[in-house]
Image (spheres, grey):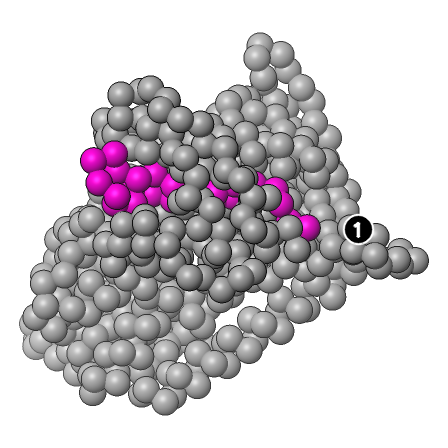
Amino acid sequence: MQSETASSAESHTRSTVERYDVVILGGGTGSTLAAWTFASESKRVAVIDRKYIGGSCPNIACLPSKNIIHSAKVASLFRRSEEFGIVHGGFTIEMPGVRERKRAMVRGLNKLYLDNYSKTGAEFILGTGRFIAPKTIEVVLSDGGTRQLQGTDVIVSTGTRASIDAIPGLAEAKPLTHIQALELGEIPDHLIVIGSGYVGIELAQAIRRFGARVTLIGRRDRLMPLEDSDVAEALRLLLEAEGIELILESRISRVSGRSGESIVVTVEQQATQRILKGSHVLVATGRTPNTESLRLEHAGIELTHRGYIKVNNRLQTTAPGVWAIGEVAGSPQFTHISVDDFRVVHDNLNGVHHVTSGRQTPYCLFTDPELARIGLNENEARAKGIAYRLFKIPMEANLRARTLSETRGFLKALVDSGSDRILGFTSFGVGAGEIMSAVQIAMIAGLPYTGLRDAILSHPTLVEGLIPLFSSMPIDFAANSVSANNEVPAPV
């Protein structure tokens, strides 16, 4: 009798499983594009996300942060207004208004995403998913109840979250992460930023421009340690010029108090101890993959030693028919890489061999001015023993930058010593990301640097600065010797 009852229950469970061609766990940008694309190809598709329509990028990360950063840029321009011949009687920053502009953008993006789900026929499910069997996910719905979904193929894209280091008192202090920092309704009296990477640097500058006192603490002896020394130094000078206190090559031994009220951070630096008192503390020290509650063992999905989902270069997991994309797969932590991860999986599911090996990874740090890079920098070229010619000019050699009164920074490019092939490009200056993209397209096309040097580019534009860059005299690092200086006359 017990056996019959168990068999009946098992049969009922099987009958409640909904079958799809593709089930996607996690609703980030790569997942969203995957859903719309597969659905438009007449596949039955479901996307599961616990909270955000479109994932973190349009809701709590990339786009909201750039929205807030632009508001901070406007505040900076107000302070510089006399430089442009504009006199005003003072201004006030109202953080609720800054926050509402960001929220309005997010609402608009959410509507756009839902409209696209409706148009394509992909199903968006708000709830928390976990594996209960191979290629089978149980979803606890946000509005109550559960569903069980099984996919012919399953894609996992649950992303990462801000790490909270095991510093005594830090977790108890309820620190801000980027999520809460982008929701501030008041200007902090004194913000202490723990972490000197992308998030820490971008938000430190933005919140300083709103009028807060800001202190940034970093473990390394310089900012952005993977970048060349001239980049790190330029960023240091930028932040210090804006009044941000930098405490580098340091270790935090304790945090006490509560963020938003009163916070005390004990810092050890060069055998001395400092006590910092602030109103808020922001943690930006890295990311942790969202894998611990997925019950991956029920699906035969293994993790790496760092806790990311183990994938091959086709983004297949250790479980047949299960793929992983984006940050949870250990991919570089950029939305544009998540999008390319989707392309890799889409091609492989359609019989086209596509791998992640050897792809370009551009990035942009959205400080003001921006930092952007594609390909090798000098540190990497030297480490690999690659001989190169270095082209470098100050941004003031770009006439468009002069019209904007934005001449801080520089452009530099590495060109292979044995050919005219561009190995890498770094820009620290106004419009750096857009200038980088022009170089990246040339690199994709296999153009020699002379193709950009001799191009007829519209005047005056920021991209036109590539002409004086590649017309300058290069420094040759073929034998660690300098063949010529790289001073460049201003273009006319």
| Above or below for 127 versus 258 | below
Nearest to the observer: residue 81 or residue 167: 81
* Helix, strand or loop at mark 1: helix
Side of 48 relative to 199 (left or right):
left
Q: Position of residue 182 (x, y in %)?
A: 61, 56
* Image point (69%, 22%), residue name: 275
10 Å crowding of disc 1: few (<14), some (14-19), many (20+): few
| Above or below for 264 versus 190 | above
Nearest to the observer: residue 104 or residue 132: 104
Quadrant of the frame with the N terminus: bottom left
Residue 173: tell me if it is visible.
no
* Image point (37%, 22%), residue name: 482
Side of 278 relative to 177 (left or right):
right
Residue 273: tell me if it is visible.
yes
Region of the chain picked out in magenta, as a range: 404-428
**Which residue occupies the extreme top position in the image?**
271
**Which residue occupies the extreme front position in the image?**
492
Nearest to the observer: residue 337 or residue 330: 337
Give residue 423's quadrant in the image.
top left
| Above or below for 99 versus 297 | below
* Image point (50%, 81%), residue name: 111
Q: Amino acid at mark 1?
A: Glu
Q: Position of residue 197 (x, y in %)?
A: 49, 39
* Image point (54%, 48%), residue name: 491
Q: Is residue 357 magenta?
A: no
Q: Position of residue 344 (x, y in %)?
A: 20, 63
Which residue has dot 1 on it?
83
Q: Position of residue 299 (x, y in %)?
A: 16, 59
Side of 442 relative to 173 (left or right):
left
